[in-house]
Amino acid sequence: MESKRSNQSHEECPMNGGEGKYSYAQNSNHQRLTADVTKHIIREVILEMLDLETLLHDSSNVIRIADLGCSVGPNTFFTVQNFIDTVNLKSQSQGHGFDSLEFQVFFNDHVGNDFHTLFKSLPEDKQYYAAAVPGSFHGRLFPESSIHVFNSTYALHWLSRVPREIVDKNSPAYNKGRIFYIDEDREVTKAYSAQFKRDFESFLNSRALEIVPGGIMSLTFLCVPPDTKNGFQVLLNIMGDVLVEMANKGLVSHELVDSFNIPIYTPASKEVIELIEKNGKFEIEKSEFLYRLIDTKRLTDAEKACMHLRAGLEGVFKEHFEEGIVDEFFILYKKQLAEQFTTLFPVSDQTCKDLGGLFVMKRTLV
Amino acid sequence: MESKRSNQSHEECPMNGGEGKYSYAQNSNHQRLTADVTKHIIREVILEMLDLETLLHDSSNVIRIADLGCSVGPNTFFTVQNFIDTVNLKSQSQGHGFDSLEFQVFFNDHVGNDFHTLFKSLPEDKQYYAAAVPGSFHGRLFPESSIHVFNSTYALHWLSRVPREIVDKNSPAYNKGRIFYIDEDREVTKAYSAQFKRDFESFLNSRALEIVPGGIMSLTFLCVPPDTKNGFQVLLNIMGDVLVEMANKGLVSHELVDSFNIPIYTPASKEVIELIEKNGKFEIEKSEFLYRLIDTKRLTDAEKACMHLRAGLEGVFKEHFEEGIVDEFFILYKKQLAEQFTTLFPVSDQTCKDLGGLFVMKRTLV
């Protein structure tokens, strides 16, 4: 039994489109929460360090903003509006000459993203010119020195592909019986980490060319604070257990389960900071971990967690498994999660409910 | 019996999407033919009058091109590539400093356009950064002074809406029993012409702000050479006859037919030139009528004409009529057209097989 796709790239595999029950649009409260938290931090950094005179050295009055991995909204609109409001505020404080700024916003995601839903839901009173840019942010998307502000929220933990070694039966990193890495398996974790390193370096090199000197880039993605249980890893490895159980029951072949892996890596913040410093083209102005308070309605949380993960990961599953299998899988997964949730995430264990890391940086002047 | 939509605007009514039998992608040979014809004219004009030093006064090396009313391809890619090749050629002749040009191309059409098909069919070896811009070109789409080259092929004869008067039972311009204007009915024709004037003026004013001084705009659309039978008008009025016949047979209500009109106007070239001159923001560098040789396989031509018109107009029909009616209508229309085709368009009558008008203009330096 063959996988529906063999190259293990997820480049064509976006968040769930439309506006239905399992759509990203209906299941992205988590991202919205994060946007609320990051809003103030980003605001502060921009007001402090953005210099419009450097940014608009070509005497144009257009600020170009790009949101990478935007999905279908509505969070991307919220984030973008925050940038615009803040730049406008900054322009007032920098005196006249910047009072007639115009904004152009580029919404980027994979070719397969549901841009139609995005276009239909663009705010009617938007104060910017909107454009969509299809393609992978691991490569080039824009002309040189053409973007003033880059943002990416919950996208950079996606790898451009599943690391080759972990689906190679002859490799010590072959990830049999699991669909994600666990820290205890060093070989698999190393392969994931190496893929993230390659991808993040391509990302930084592309953005360094596309951003204007003095431009700002804000990246929020899943990453792990030091000495903390990786909650996302726990949730995904339960997925692997459910799939193996389905294979044991003959509902799906073992081979299909063994060849399936989730192309996501949640780096330690230390890894991210080292890569940015090694790249040398951006100066980190702020790096923070984002947390949220725990909802005490436990069962709802398990259900919400499942819906949330389904909205984001269903595409990867559907690329590999038959649709019927995917539906059955998520039913079983939700059941399993509800049973284990309070044990896995006890009320006292607040630190593992992190929302990821935020890194705000500035393109060095060249 | 009510129309499915009442505001009579066609803004949300794009060419047929996808890649099926009646899709625009499969039925736009006519447009491709035109692109072949205009290619050389546009090339000549750009080589003669484009000045890269004026255009790139901000010392950027990015040329931004926008195709307005792009539909889903492939013609838009062909046209865009011609602009890029020609600008590159020009840059070589203007000496060093322009040898590392980058291109960003904006594909514009209504929000309802099938941008997914457009994105999927972007040439793999494209030498530009692609972006899509959803929205009506009768209003603003881009920041000020941000586009160097505008193109629009077969889109500007579309009106932003059906003129109000022609669906008003109390107006002398009420267009009962027809779905398009005929020159003999002055009131209806005047209402269509006035709507075109308003739309074209909005278009020119928006583009004048968005284009850089010295930038080039090339517009190709249906328009009528002097002293010529308006072939398009003939084809559309046969559509009206077929609909009235369907109403007489009780297949559709008379009211529904009377309230239906095609929001297209094919101006005389004189009208277009006068409006451009009155607007005063562009200098016309070239205005030409485009012709093609006649295919002698008559029946094929009737069939092709029907398929072509269906790809472009089906959306407008489907907005107003039930889907079953639309299918039946096009079957009857094809039959009717095949019967009349040789009489209407005899071999000797070459001049009415025009491909429209081409107007190439330059933004005046301000």
Image (cartoon, coloured by chain):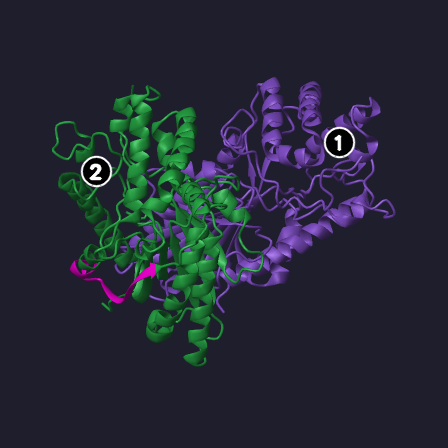
Chain colours: A purple, B green
Q: Nearest the camera: A81 or A91? A: A81
Q: Secondary structure at mark 1?
A: helix
Q: Is residue A173 left or right of residue B296?
A: right
Whether residue A146 appears in this view of the structure is no
Q: Is residue B13 left or right of residue B125?
A: left
Disc 1 marks which amino acid? Answer: Gly
Whether residue B272 appears in this view of the structure is yes
**Label 2 CA crowd tier, 10 Å (few <14, some 14–19, many 20+):** many
Q: Is residue B283 above or below residue A327?
A: below
**Label 1 CA crowd tier, 10 Å (few <14, some 14–19, many 20+):** many
Which mark, residue B163? 2
Q: Residue B308: where, in percent of width, then height?
A: 42, 44
Q: Is residue B152 magenta?
A: no
- Label 1 and label 2 in one chain: no
Q: Chain of mark 1?
A: A
Q: Is residue B284 magenta?
A: yes
Which mark, residue A154? none
Residue at the spot of label 1: A240
The residue at 71%/41% (across/down) is: A5
Residue A278, quarter of the rendered image:
bottom right
Q: Residue B184: where, in percent of width, then height?
A: 16, 42
Q: Chain of mark 2?
A: B
Q: CA distance from mark 1 to mark 2?
A: 61 Å
